[in-house]
Amino acid sequence: MTDLFDHRNEVADDAAAGTARAEARRVERRQKAKRRVQRRRNIVSFVVMIIALALLIGGGWVLVRPLLTPEDTETTITDYPGPGTGQVQVVVSEGDNGSDIAATLTEANVVATEGAFVSAFSANPDSGSIQPGTYALQEEMAASDAVRALLDPASRADMSITVPEGTRATTIYERIATQLEVEVADVEAAAEDVAENHLPDEANGNIEGWLLASTYNIHPDDTPQSILEKMVDRTVATLDDLEVPRNQREDTLTIASIIEAEVVLPEDRGRVARVVQNRIDGCSGDGTIGMDSTLAYGLNTPAAEITSDQWDDASLPYNTRRVPGLPPTPINSPGQAAMEAAQSPANGNWCYFVTVNLDTGETRFTDDVDEHHQNQEAFREWVAENR
């Protein structure tokens, strides 16, 4: 009986102990939950404090910065808003790229920074068409407006002279005189000075052939002498680019000038250069190149008006029917393509050529003299039919 009561007491004690432990666990869980809530509150409070502190510091810097460094507001300008004021002339030189132009415009205060102009230059698909020359622009322009102004012909403050391939020096003098509104005699005097003091030694003091066929911009301060010097410099630069040795430059220009006078179609340049070289090498029998254009230049008259006595006169230095080799000087201003052909003639054994149709420019080349005579007859027939 005693054992029964003892067992019941043990069961009651175990139940009471279990209840106590459960209550303790509930208390512990509530305490953990409170601690987690408190930690979250602490974190939120910390973040809010940091943000408030940052705003306070930032606002203070905004208020204090102008007082500390008032000049900094000027350095932040990277591009003017435009449209610009006043007027200034700037020069875009031959070979200038976007960075070069940017430096020129920044120095003249046309644009605020080089970077702004380079960005606008890169963004405009037509910017590569900007031509060398003198431009009238405004100061403090937006960079994009400056690019557009350089592309607008109305902004040009200069003129230009175009020297077509095959133009003689005397004609070039007339064009310069017309553009600068001076007397031709003034240009001729300038040419004499340039020939004496500016031509390279290999030109032997003769300016003919050394005025490269091209287009030249005339700046407001240009003179006949400065323009002629520019043409000579362009010729020298072209010969340098083609790597023509100095002792071959005069002959190269002479052959190139003959090509310009004799060729109708561009594809015949190299073949005419080869004929000239083959004749000098002896295919004609006596080393004469037999070009009508050279005597026409020497006499300053059209080839059709040269008399038989003049053709037979071996004392005329430009009479390449009678005098072997090249004439004493070039006979006009050649372009770069003719210079290239003179340097690298086409491959062939031709000794003769004649243009048989002046409308189409058809030119026949041969190494047979009888065939050449037939080609000459074909030309005479064309002339008779199209007189």
Image (cartoon, helix red, strand yellow):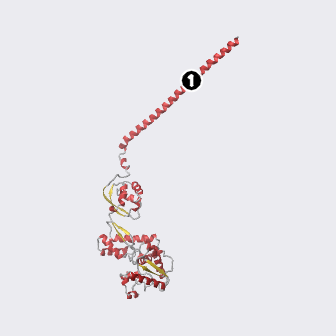
One can see residue 9 in this view: yes
Q: Residue at x 47, y 33 (%)?
A: 44
Q: Nearer the viewer, residue 300 or 227?
A: 300
The answer to which image quadrant residue 355 occupies is: bottom left
User: Which picture quadrant has residue 240?
Assistant: bottom left
Percent x, y for residue 368?
A: 49, 84
Q: Position of residue 112 (x, y in %)?
A: 36, 54
Q: Nearer the viewer, residue 193 or 151?
A: 151
Mark 1 Cα shell of 10 Å, populated few (<14), some (14-19), many (≥20): few
Q: Residue furthest top?
A: 1
- Image: 84 above or below 221: above
**In the rendered view of the protein, which quadrant contains the C terminus?**
bottom left
Return the x and y of residue 66 as percentages of the image width and height. 36, 43
Residue 119 x/y as whole percent: 41, 55
The N terminus lies in quadrant:
top right
* Amino acid identity at mark 1: Arg
The answer to which of 383 and 247 lies nearer the viewer is: 383
